[in-house]
Amino acid sequence: MTMTARAPVTSPVAGLARPPDPVLPEVLPPPRRGSAERAAVLTLAAALIFQPILHPTGPGNSSPVDLLTLTSIAVAAIWAAGSHRKLRAPYCIPVALMVGAGALSGLAGPLPGTALLALAIDMLLFAWCTTAVNVLGTPSAMRIALACWSWSGICWAAIVVVAGMAHITPIEGLAAAEGNRVLFTFGDPNYASTYWDTTIFVVYACRTPASPWLRRIGYVLLVWALVLTESNGGMLSLAVGIAFVVLVKLHARRGWPAVGAAVTALALCVTGLFIAVPLPKIQQWALNSGQPQLVNSTGRSAQSLYERRQLYRETIQLDERSKGLLGWGPATTKPLLADLQYPYSNEAHSDFLAGLVERGPLGALGVVLLFGSAFLRAAPIVRHRLSAGFAAAVPRPIGLVAGLLTLSLNSFYEEILHFRFLWALLAIVAVLGTDARRPEREP
């Protein structure tokens, strides 16, 4: 008996042969158990799980989580070398500008050791971002990573909430300089607030936990942990991120006229509120309320704003003393302001201002290009659908764009480029943006 080839299925309308079904990335099997690829995914997921574990600190401001970060980079390098796969580094040009300008400024500046240590941290974070871009290139790996981030973030928030209710000081991470602001193991209230903000939008994006009730409980715990940081910037960024998600959904259903009407109504409501009850009156009421959460958040906002303005003024004066196109060197703002006996000697508290003062105009350009390229990669996520595999792993990808937006807002009043989870989010956005940009995507 002879075997005959099956004839192609023809279209009854046009009489043309139907092309074979495309092989979509979502039908590819997950990494094999025991394989190098699976090890790379799991070590990266472990690094995401332990992102909050930053204390106790080690030499060069290193943290316990950095051991997992280095392990994930090493395992991914072994996997990439064995598989001979082509690696992607989507943010190499902005980082090259930042590192190159920082190296020139640091070597010519008064604190070359401090500058070179900061550059080594920059390179480590960029290597981890590149690792995440290549390891999370499949829907199964993306699903594992985001699920680990979501579940671990909720669990950490639950620990913080329990510690706050029971007044377990070692877990709360209270510091005399920060009052009763709960730092956990972050060591900085703004670092903690940005992590809780971003995790809220990661949970929203991947819909993990799958149960709606568990997810609502997770939101409550994460917002509670955010409130315990008493961060005005964190609460403002969360509100902006939520407004962004609502407006994108409104545009999808009703179009631009509805978005314009909603923005106008919101602006009128906020303006009317502040006319009826001026902001200084709200700040004074919070300061005299006797409630620690209000006193140390809204009540201290006027003083915080004044101190931040003074710090910006001092940092600009330091920039005016710099050497032309070169800055003073990465991470040198605080020690230089202290040496010059400025009253508010501290970090620049702005990535853009720090880039200009410490790395010069080229370094500031690198910072702008980094955030600009991130949003360019995020734009297709807003405009187009993901492939079926990535859409199953990230049902609401707009949440990740909202998370990126909240982090970007924080970069204006806090230096976030050394936040490790920022680089993980940049990698995730790059992967999903590439997937959404593919021309063969079905409508």
Image (cartoon, helix red, strand yellow):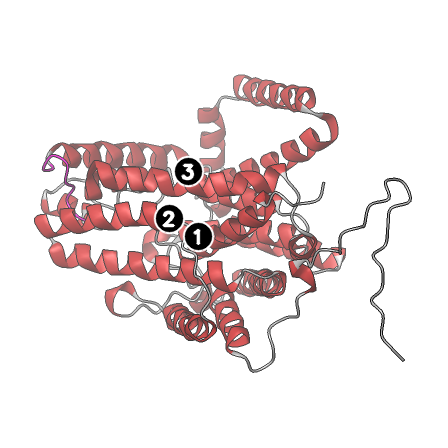
Residue receiving disc 2: 416
Q: Is residue 325 magenta?
A: yes
Q: In the picture provided, is 240 more to the left or to the right than 61? A: right
Classify residue 213 by image quadrant: bottom right
Specify start and end residues of the magenta stretch as a single range: 322-329
Q: Are marks 1 and 2 in contact (CB under 8 Å)?
A: yes
Residue depicted at 11% across the width and 53% down the height: 111
Foreground pick, 268 / 209: 209
Q: Which residue is mark 3?
A: 372
Please tell me how crowded label 3 is: few (under 14), some (14-19), or many (20+) other residues with Cα within 10 Å. Answer: few
Residue 249, by quadrant, is top right
Mark 2 belongs to which amino acid? Ile
Check disc 1 and report its element: helix, strand or loop. helix
Q: Amino acid at mark 1?
A: Leu
Query: Residue at point 36% right, 57% down?
Result: 126
Q: Main secondary structure of the magenta part?
A: loop
**Nearer the N terminus, badge 1 or badge 2?**
2
In terms of secondary structure, where does tag 2 sit? loop
Q: Nearer the viewer, mark 1 or mark 3?
A: 3
Q: Earlier in the sequence, mark 1 or mark 3?
A: 3
Q: Which mark is residue 422?
A: 1
